[in-house]
Amino acid sequence: MYEYEIHQVRAAELVRQAEHSRLVREAREARRNRRAERRAASAGQDAEGRVNSPRSRRSRFARAA
């Protein structure tokens, strides 16, 4: 009986650890998402904006020889 109680305590501890790890991971993801949203809002574009600027000097294609 004693071993069974130890098993139950250990299982409960593992459940608590898993819950804590999940909460930490979710908090990190939420923080990362908020940071990305702020960065996108301050840049004046959505999260998946243009890679190059609309008025770049370089041509998009290489010149023919």
Image (cartoon, helix red, strand yellow):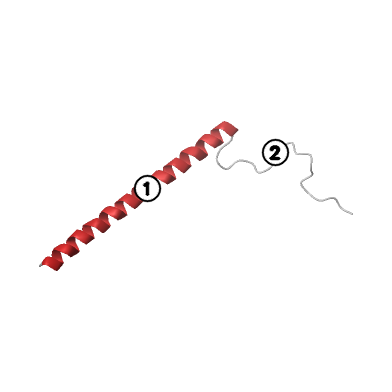
Q: Residue under circle 2?
A: 53
Distance of mark 1 from mark 2, alpha carbons? 37 Å
**Front residue of 34 and 5:** 5
Disc 2 marks a residue whose amino acid type is Ser
Location of the N terminus (image quadrant): bottom left
Badge 2 crowding class, 10 Å Cα cut-off, few under 14, some 14 to 19, many 20 or more, is few
> Within the image, what quadrant is residue 13 found in?
bottom left
Disc 1 marks a residue whose amino acid type is Val
**Residue at disc 1, secondary structure:** helix
Location of the C terminus (image quadrant): bottom right
Q: Residue under circle 1?
A: 24
Which dot, 1 or 2, sits closer to the camera? 1
Going by the picture, which residue comes out furthest to the right?
65
**Figure disc tally:** 2
Q: Position of residue 37 (x, y in %)?
A: 50, 37
**Front residue of 24 and 43:** 24
Badge 1 crowding class, 10 Å Cα cut-off, few under 14, some 14 to 19, many 20 or more, is few
